[in-house]
Image (tube, helix red, strand yellow):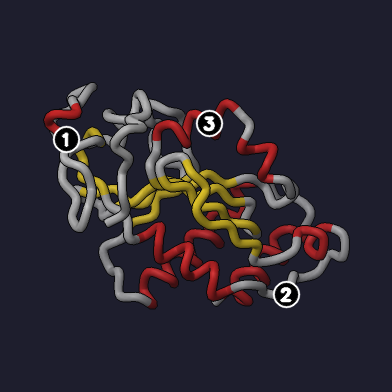
Amino acid sequence: MLKTYLKKISDTATRGDAREESYYSTLKDLLDLYCNSIGKKNIHITSQPKKTEAGNPDFRVWDGKQHITGYIEAKDPVVDNLDRIEETDQLKRYLHTFPNLILTNFLEFRLYRNGILTNKVISGRPFILHKLKTTPPAEKEHELLQLFEKFFSFSIPIDNSHSSCISRQNTSRISDGVSGTPFSSDGRLTLFSSRIASNPWKAR
């Protein structure tokens, strides 16, 4: 799975005319393949989804109906230092807003839960891709699959009422199940306009 993915990333990069969006379909194929391998048939991965209140993450992951899994923000593989991306206003806004977020440059994957980095996996070396112009050997595939497992285990209901704010009193927290309606029906997050640090979200 990972070797095939990295070969496609390398093929795209070595053509020399790729931009960030050129890699989207390859990442989507990897995520679709993972979901199929674990029997998750109701997952929809939308690249370049409609704008949220926090901005424009590159991928929205949801069930196509009532629940959102999370968002993915991607950077071009030439961006080999995601630490700098973490310090940008854009990512700070996403971390403040989205309780389940992946940041990736298509080689390194970072998972954030409630704004906190929980998993980081480098699946292939940028140096090998960019300097040696060849496919990086696959690394830490097991750890990457664990990161995906944690990301896809999360689910939040969509708010069909289009309300712009949901009070703490009307929102139950995630424990073994999920309740509450923090997303509007068009995918905009309505709860996390401010971080509720005293009562963090938990994975299902």
In the rendered structure, which disc, 2 or 1, sits on the residue that comes first in sequence?
Answer: 2
Q: Name the residue nearer the viewer: 179 or 75.
A: 179
Total labels: the figure holds 3
Q: x, y percentage for residue 190?
A: 27, 28
Q: Is residue 163 left or right of residue 145?
A: left
Do we see residue 16 in this rendering? Answer: yes
Residue at x 39% of width, y 77% of height: 37
Q: 49 above or below 120?
A: above
In the rendered structure, which disc, 1 or 3, sits on the residue that comes first in sequence?
Answer: 3
Kindly identify which numbered label has been placed on residue 92: 3
Mark 2 or mark 1, which is nearer to you?
A: 1
Mark 1 lies on a secondary structure that is: loop
Mark 3 or mark 2, which is nearer to you?
A: 3
Q: Name the residue nearer the viewer: 96 or 64.
A: 96
Do we see residue 56 in this rendering? Answer: no
Kindly identify which numbered label has been placed on residue 171: 1
Gap in angstroms between the C-alphas marked 1 and 3? 24 Å
Q: x, y percentage for residue 127?
A: 82, 60
User: Badge 3, how many Cα within 10 Å: few under 14, some, many 20+?
Assistant: few
User: Please, what is the three-letter code of the amino acid marked with disc 2?
Assistant: Pro
Q: x, y percentage for residue 188?
A: 31, 32
Residue at numbered disc 2 = 137
Residue at x 63% of width, y 76% of height: 3
Kindly identify which numbered label has been placed on residue 87: none
Q: x, y percentage for residue 6?
A: 65, 69
Residue at x 18% of width, y 36% of height: 159
Residue at x 40% of width, y 66% of height: 149
